[in-house]
Image: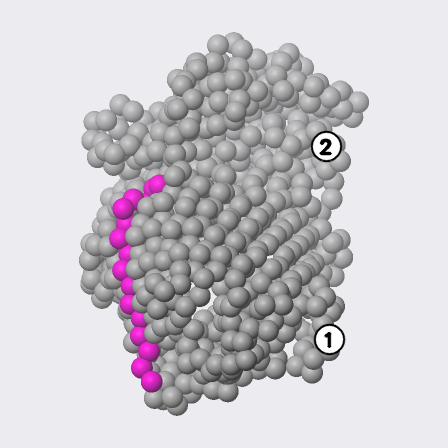
Amino acid sequence: MNLPGKKYVVIIYVLLSIFTGEVSAQLTRITGRVTDVASGQGIPFANVYFLGSSVGTTTNDDGYYKIVTARLYDSLTVTFIGYQSQTREIIHGKDQQFDFKLIEDKIILNELIVRPDEDLVDLLMIWILRNKENNNKSQLDFYEYEVYNTIQIDINNVNEKFKKRKVFRSFEFIFDNVDTSALNGKTYLPVFLSEAISNFYYRKRPRATREIIRAYNISGIENQSVTQYLGGLYMNIDIYDNLIFLFDKNFISPISNSGKLYYKYTIVDSVFIDNKWCFEVTFKPKRKQELTFTGSFWVNDTTFAIKRVDMKVVEDANLNFINDLWITQEYNRINNRYWMVVRETMIADINPVENQNKLFGFFGRRTTTYKDFVFNKTKDSKFYNHPLQVNVEENAIEKSEEFWEGARHRELSLQEQEIYHMVDSIKMVPVFQTYLDILFLVTNGYWVEGNFEIGPIYKSLSFNVIEGTRLRFGGRTSNDFSKKIMFDGYLAYGFKDQEFKFGTGVTYMISKNPRRRINANFKYDLEQLGQSPNAFAEDNFFAAFFRRSPANKLTFVREYSGLYEHEWFSGFSNTFRFINRDVFPLGDTRFIIYEGDDVVLLKSLTTSEIQVVTRYAPGEKYLYGEFERINLGTRYPVLELLYGYGIPGFLGGKYEYHRLQVGVKQKFNIFSAGWSKYVLVAGKIWGTLPYPLLKIHNGNETFLFYENAFNLMNYYEFISDQYASLYLAYHFDGLILNHIPIIRKLKWRSFIHARTVIGSLTEANKSYSEYPVFSGELLDPYYEAGAGIENIFKVARVDAIWRLSGWDKQTTKKFGIFASLQFSF
């Protein structure tokens, strides 16, 4: 299979899809309340756990708790800073209630009680901010350390209905591992575990980082590309940053320079931690549904450095699929000088329906420890200029158990050891592979049969004016056939035009990372010129249902193409492409050119073109598959330069021309108030050419919104040989709608956007060919603007778009409503 991380993604998704049955083990359920013995008031956030384990929960705002387990524990313990701990014996397999009345421990508080004092906390926050630069590790010139990182994925909301599902008849053994979350009391089933050991290196000027993954271990999965995300580099959370980047959004750090605008702070405790006197400060947001946290941090009383932080994303944040997100960081002062994170945990409770305890979801847990710190040790610049920011050593997956026993920063728990065994056992069940194949078909459109993948299924049947009903059969070789070379092809037939169409191709991967590949293709099929590159293909089954006008502007194309892509380093590449192409008119379309006084009717237009594409996207990250990769984006501008030359007389090419196009785009967050995007493109074509070889501006004749098209412009409506376009968008991410009480609970998000293009034709190109009656030159700039609502049911988007210029044609629309689907946090 050819999608990125296929085994990693699909195995986890199958587990998520099928784990909806009932636990077969006997459960122990305990409920109760934790209160202050003197006042009788509930104690929030008290720790409730089974003695001798890491299984537990915390009390809610009123001191109530609930905990469930299938394991054999005999005692339940409650602890909270400033109080004496208490332990009760329990009976396994029964429902019980225990209320704890805690007694204040003045020894723990060292007989010093700090009362809430607004002036004192304001002064403390001032000193924290003044010392941020001194305490922030990013101010060091160089540092390096060893990272041990584990990632665990658990199915949660495992309930009593699990065993009623027939799908579990072959998987009953998995329920021996059911346990209870220490954070919210949800029962969960661990299904995936990875661990990695790496060395991380940092340089301040010029800023650079590099990580070398020396060893990794993944439960039942062997995909090297996934290991790039198992180290520490891609999961960096720095409390000292003003904005913390999570799930593609900017959250306000609790010690942000502007934190006082967003948080209410209170000093609630003070105590020695690791022989350092610290104040505990709680923080909570001042307003609802902002991208903020709630929790507490401990700050050293002399350096004003953060010693520990425990925080969670606020429950009402306008964030999709995330029920809860907890983050804990522990800092130590290394060499009595540098404050560094030594341990970090992050747990995400992810569910398609928020605040739902009946539907299954999953926990994603990451635990990272750091040691062997080295400061201000310089390295040769070549070390940081390596083409890969993250390296995986060649034998990283081949480490022995003896190596891991000596290299781990901590021992694996019994539960973690059982995960490896369980996942390997699931893979041995024959029905598991069937679930993999079905899920791969649903998510990717291909059905896997050994060395071959049949699809895309959604292109098997389609409709258009030229072909009528169209049937298509296609596929490609799978990774079982080869991980270096992939063949693909299809055959299609239209019942109206009674013509066969087909295409075939081959890709040879020289290297995945950096990406270097050779590709060759042949196509003999219909094509819609001037269509957005991200639009539904005309042979997509769903395309016919969203058209606002018949697909009667198609052309026939016979095309040979080949390319070589060479990525010099991550984010910078060149692609060298050759295209030999014949374009044939269909229906009432004609290709007529004027040569002097002669009028020539052409059967086709033949070109041979070489192209060189240069792409620079600093900081861009990818998830790699064997042949394809998923772009995870970058926060920096992306520059793309295309140069093409038409070669006359070569393989039938009749036209000589030069084309140059420059584009720059960027998506960036605006503090915590949403995000924006711009796309600027300019180009010019030198040469006298028939209109189909000029720039046909991307139109849209469907009811679906396409970001790369002018959505109220028709196909072929405007043609240019020099042009410039600009797209601007601003997504408020709930900034406006979050403050409207009726709409707030829906978590809808508003946005606005605008697009414009200017262009012209030389006199030579105006008079060289006959243009269709529905086509013409851009005499004035074209404008359209839109606004809309997104995040409807978390996936739907509706755009209202106004055309602000070029209304002189009867076929144009001044206003339109468009729909689309998008998935985002």
Magenta residues, start to end:
499-514
Q: What residue lies at 67% left-to-right and 43% top-to-bottom?
A: 670
Left/right placement of residue 824 relative to residue 630 reads right
Residue occupied by mark 1 = 807
Is 554 situated above or below 295?
below
| Lower position in the chain sequence, tag 1 or tag 2 | 2
Taking depth in this image into account, of 75 and 382 the one nearest to the observer is 382
Taking depth in this image into account, of 486 and 261 the one nearest to the observer is 486
Q: What residue lies at 67% left-to-right and 41% top-to-bottom?
A: 671
| Type of colouring | one colour
Taking depth in this image into account, of 305 and 426 the one nearest to the observer is 305
* Circle on res. 258: 2
Q: What residue lies at 51% left-to-right and 82% top-to-bottom?
A: 599
Q: Position of residue 547 (x, y in %)?
A: 55, 79
Q: Is mark 2 on a helix, strand or loop?
A: loop
Left/right placement of residue 23 relative to residue 348 reads left
Q: Position of residue 679 (x, y in %)?
A: 60, 53
